[in-house]
Amino acid sequence: MIEKLRRKMSNETIIIVFFLFILILVSITFTLLYGSFLSTRNIKLLFQHMSVTALAALGLTFVIIVGHFDMSFHMVGCFAGMTASFMIGEGYLPLPSVILGLLVGLIFGFVNGITIGKFNLPDMIITIGTGSIALGLGYLYSGGAFIYDNFLVSGILKINNSEWFGIPFPTILMIISYFIAYMVLNRSKYGRYFYATGDNKEIAIFSGIRVKLYIIVAFIISAFLSSLATILITSAQGVGNVKAGLNLLMPAYASIYIGISVFRKPTVIGTLFGALFTSIMLNGFTLMNIPFYFQDLTISSTMIITIIFSKKIITNLTTQKTSTVQTSDKEVAS
Amino acid sequence: MASYKLQMKGIEKVFPGVKALDGVNFELKTGEVHALLGMNGAGKSTLIKILSGIYQKDAGEIFLDGKKIKIIRPEDAINSGIATVYQDPQMIPSFTGYENIFLGFESNKRGIFSRINRQKLLKQAEQLLKRFPVDIDLTKSVKQLKTVEKEIIAILKALSKDMSILVLDEPTSILTEKEKNVLFDLIKMLKQRGISIIYITHRLEEIFEISDRLTIYRDGKNVATLEVKDKETNSGKIAKLIIGEEINKFYPDKGNDFGNEVISVNGLSLEGVFKDVSFRVRKGEILGIFGLVGSGIEELSKVLFGAYPKTSGIIKINRQEVNFNSPSQAISHGIFLIPWNRRLEGVFDNQPIYFNISLSNMEKIVNLFGLVQQHKEKQIVKKISDQLKITPANINQNVSFLSGGNQQKVVIGKGLFVEANTYIFAEPTTGVDVGAKVGIYNLIRKLSRHKAVILISSDCKEVFSMCDHVIAMHKGRVTMHEDVDKVNLEDMFLKGVMG
């Protein structure tokens, strides 16, 4: 029976169908445990929450594609969120506040990109460093205290609350961002350059690709989208909280790696799948009144289990088909 | 019989598609330096790998001191007293010299808590070193040492295990003249101590300096064993024996219809690597550049492609001076390099064929917004793939499933997609089987009809037979620059290997 199925479908379809099956299984479990899981209100809430994770994860996907790591994006987000909050508190309009917030995010992304892409410094330690600087700067505005001033009157809350055609604005932002990212990464020449850079820098350079540029751009996109995500969180919470972005770290990485375990490489669709999956889990736990500190614990465990699972079981399932194709191309003695 | 330290008789080794060794014999006397010569693929490296236990022979016998021995694993070779030192030996860079010498043999005691007596080890290593006229600081970490010092440490490591046969695989190819002399002094000392040395090299001049006898292999067969002292042994004779008589008929015809100059290079230099290289290539012409590892030809090709910055010199394309400092700029000036190492510089092997072929000139297939017109891409790539006869013909196939020859064709296809005016081929036929070789040679000749082609290779036959104009390089200098019909193969070979 499995043999027959396997012959009919491509490897990718097997994995996607399998993944959807798990997704539905999880949803059914939550519905059984908590009836209103599938209510319109909860679905809307789910997507609103997912948008934030998905945006941060999307930016990070670019960095993962070019073969690097970004451990700073969530902390850069904190700084961007606090910058916007501070502006609101000082009485500025939402638009310039948000733009300045995004701008400081961009600057950090640029610094990451230059140090790692141009000067070849190690990505992990550099981004932990720049991220900590960003978080430190975020504290400077209020000494770590919440910023409430003008939040209710300035209109910043509308970013989260307004709806277009019944769809929450954050969800629209997510859909637009994912559409653009999909077109760039899957359909445009730039997508090829990003993937080529991450696959093998040396070959990419010899193919005439300006790898340094694409690494810099990837870090900028990561910082920009995580800043946007944190500003959305700020708008949703209605308060400037320096720690607003910190909870993005694990869900973002989990989304990407769940996506990778489905599609074998970092992709826009894979990350979207991953974000949906992590958000459903988090939403379900919230409904079940499971304390917030279980979030990272469960998300991280899920991520690691997914990685192990996809390595072990899915590779076994799929390699049987492909292994025989490999032509023997042993190096001839020189 | 007993006077031979080592005898190898009727050794055979078959690789998929190639008979690397076809009944080869080798005899080594006690206390001699015996050179192994032959072109790439002649079988000398395979023979050494069998002797050191890396490969297993398919047929034949090995005798040590007249007794038949079996070498199945590298340990067997070491236990029989056979040690091999490769060029640029692998060591643990952060460990010191003496730690590397005794790596794995630090202590006889078992157990995790048995202490390593560093003082004792250092003393032992110094005693070992004292027997030879070399001066190395054994307490320095290996990464701070020069290449020759690393090689000597590798030799000391071999000596620490009581060996009687030392195999040196092209030890001088990346050494300077001065470093080479240090190594040669050491070899002479070892010889006096009765150690037999097998010395593999491409550099003929060294043979007269260091070796007693030499054996030449060609196409997996013995050609000759000569005494170096013999008056009839000279470099001309050796060159003839290495190259062989017949030039294979599978090379395409030479060019005859030369058009305008496409690329010219004047006084090109890269400090410390190569100096004052000048040439020009016309449409319809193939320029060949022949040299060994260390001659600077690899760096030259990378300078021409913008991967390394030049120190001085002028590059002109269509008589216009151009300056570039990255491959992406070189490509935009119409230069394309089919690089040295396919796996490291040429193809993305977990990407499909079309991805690889179109990558360097996406402009050709994208619309105003940079979006790929997939239909157009597939059409052009398919045409190139058919023209090159890439198999499998499915352009969605990942490159990792292709044979070496087909992978090389993908790289060439990438070049065709770029529509450059100058193509530089670097070692285009390494790791490619004979059938695919013919295909690639014909492609290069066909390509040259409308383009300038530069073929850079350490295979002298390939350069001589394919090209209309040849340059030989030795240690960074141009030693020959002639039309191919005015030179003969032996002269070109000697200019490349001896200067």
Image (tube, coloured by chain):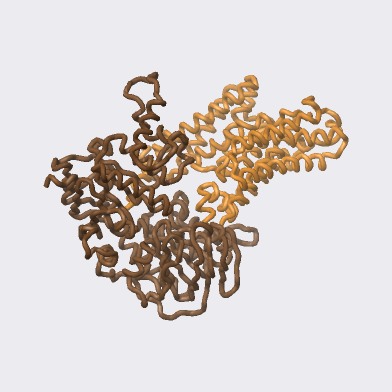
Chain colours: A orange, B brown
Residue drawn 75% across the image and 33% down it: A137
Residue B17 in view in this figure? no
Q: Position of residue B211 (x, y in %)?
A: 27, 54
Quarter of the rendering containing residue A52: top right
Compared across the picture, whether B8 is left or right of B443 comes to: left
Residue at the limit of the structure toward the right, as seen here: A91
The residue located at (31%, 37%) in the rendering is B159
Please state if A294 lies on the left or on the right of B424 as rendered.
Answer: right
Q: Residue furthest left?
A: B1
Residue B146 appears in the rendering: yes
Q: For residue B249, which quarter of the picture?
A: bottom left
* Residue A232: quarter of image: top right
Q: Nearer the viewer, residue A272 or B197?
A: B197
Residue at image point 23% right, 50% down: B13
Pinpoint residue B449: horizontal percent, then vertical percent: 44, 75
Figure check: B42 above or below B279: above
Frontmost residue, B458 versus A192: B458
Location of the C terminus of chain B by quadrant is bottom left
Residue sitting at x 53%, y 31%: A303
The percent coordinates of residue A328 (x first, y second) are: 32, 50
Q: Is residue B324 above or below residue A163?
A: below
The percent position of residue B394, horizontal first and vertical second, equals: 42, 57
